[in-house]
Amino acid sequence: MLIQPAFITFTGIDDRTDLTMADSLASQYPIEWGVLFSSNNRDARFPSTQAVMEILSISGMKSAHLCGAFSKQAQSGAIPEGVPLLEFDRVQINGFNLDQTYFNDIEAQYGVQLIQQMRSESFDVESKHLQLYDRSGGAGILPVSVPKLGGQDRLVGYAGGIGPDSVLHYLEMIEGVGKFWIDMEGKVRTDGWFDVRKAAQVCEAVFRTIAR
């Protein structure tokens, strides 16, 4: 039996995204827009400062995804310049086996929830932060199996190879009790740019198919 996610995170919304379409989609379905930040933002996945401000104004939750040097800065307790963290609901500090010394301080200071990527076969029920299962690490590889849900009171996330053609298969692997979200990036891009139409296909497959 397929379980419906609490919401879907579409990561990599960018400068060419039709924000009118994105706003309309997020007004129909529970969506979080994942905005990627990097000190070396040379490709389409990383929006300009102007685009970030416009993205923050549309419907849907927002998460900031800190990559590379920005992730390292956050681990040292410093928020990278140009990242308006107060405007986001959640923050994902990319990488594995991170130094968590300052994570509680960041959550308290900015009023955000922190997301950690993990690769283990089960969620850590003792973790103080949100966990996202992603063995793919951004490579878009669909896993063979996934950890069971984290329990009634714990929200967990799943990523890796999810897109319009694979989302229902991925959901079939999720078992157990609890709430979860799914996150995707590469499979909802066309020619390197975020594709709202593919995001819409995912939403329709998930929320209309499972609701039937």
Image: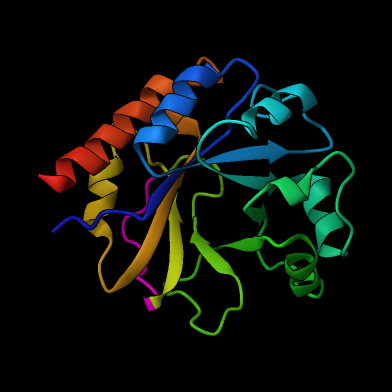
Residue at the left extreme, as displayed: 212
The picture places residue 93, in percent across and down from the top left corner, at: 69, 56
Residue at 36 percent across and 55 percent down: it is 6
Question: Magenta span: helix, strand or loop, mainly?
Answer: loop
Q: Which quadrant, please, contains the N terminus? A: bottom left
Residue at 29 percent across and 39 percent down: it is 166
Relative to 86, is 152 on the left or the right? left
Magenta residue span: 142-152
Q: In the picture, residue 203 is in which quadrant?
A: top left
Q: Is residue 148 above or below residue 73?
A: below
Tally the marks. Answer: 0
Asked whether the viewer can see residue 205, the reply is yes
Residue at 35 percent across and 34 percent down: it is 28
The picture places residue 207, in percent across and down from the top left corner, at: 24, 42
Q: Does the stretch in magenta take in 71?
A: no
Residue at 72 percent across and 29 percent down: it is 53
* Colour convention of the picture: rainbow
Q: Is residue 122 above or below residue 54?
A: below
Asked whether the viewer can see residue 189, the reply is no
Q: Is residue 90 above or below residue 122?
A: above
Relative to 212, is 31 on the left or the right? right
Q: In the picture, residue 57 is in which quadrant?
A: top right
The picture places residue 70, in percent across and down from the top left corner, at: 81, 48
Q: Does the stretch in magenta take in 150?
A: yes
Q: Which quadrant, please, contains the C terminus? A: top left
The picture places residue 160, in percent across and down from the top left corner, at: 44, 47
